[in-house]
Image (cartoon, rainbow, N blue to C red):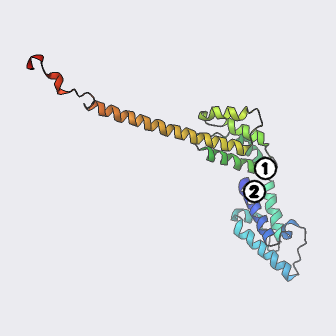
Amino acid sequence: MKSNTYFRWVSFFKSMCSKFGVKSHIDGTVATRPQDPNSDQVDCCIRSWFFSSVDDSILDLAIINEDQTAQDLWLTIEGLFCANKQSQEIFLSHDFHSMTQGDSFIGEYCSRMKTLLDALCDIGHPVQDSELVLNLLCGLNPCFSNIADNIANSTTSFASFAQAWDMLALKELHLANKEKISNSTTLLARNSSSYSSSGCAGWVSPIVWFCPEWW
């Protein structure tokens, strides 16, 4: 199971259980009572949520028998994920530190980095905001070098990830507008050159062809 997928699923499932007041059936704060019809009904309902929200490949590994409680399934799925934590940390850390912007937009680049950040936090390896910002700046397209230096060398306070994202997005808009103006100027110059080469700009008044003796 991919860590970012697991992270989103855990958040979704806990929220749904809390919404209906049955979170105790997965966190173990209240013991499951199979002989109690009401308790068993709630447990069956939660298990049905597992079947509709967890991929079949995970369920095939998690489901051992039909007597498993909702908490049993919850802990088994958690165990499947935790078993791969070490290898996931290695791959996620490599992807995080080697990420570059390339030709993608700032929003896409920052979103990808935020996804990896969440994945690392989910397996117990949070990244400090300052490290996140520096990693973001290191992978930027060279056209953002000036604003990257300004963010990194701020004398007041080190920019947060959200602030850096906002500053880079504004710079991206500025660069896009600058390119648009440059393209418009180039097109105007080309049109002017074509007009001149057509002979209109080099037109000479017929009066210059008159000889003095004609007067």
Task: Give the number of the disc on residue 121.
Answer: 1
Report if residue 91 is visible in the image: no
Report if residue 128 is visible in the image: yes
Q: How far across and how far down the image is residue 16, in percent?
A: 76, 68
Q: In front here: 139 or 48?
A: 139
Q: Is residue 138 above or below residue 123?
A: above
Mark 1 near mark 2, Cβ–Cβ under 8 Å?
A: yes
Which residue has dot 2 on it? 7
Secondary structure found at label 1: helix
Q: From this viewpoint, which residue is outermost toward the left?
A: 214
Q: Is residue 146 above or below residue 210?
A: below
* Three-letter code for the amino acid on which mark 1 is drawn: Cys
Which quadrant is home to the N terminus?
bottom right
Q: In front here: 92 or 100?
A: 100
Give the CA distance from mark 1 to mark 2: 9 Å
- Left or right? Give the position of 177 relative to 132: left
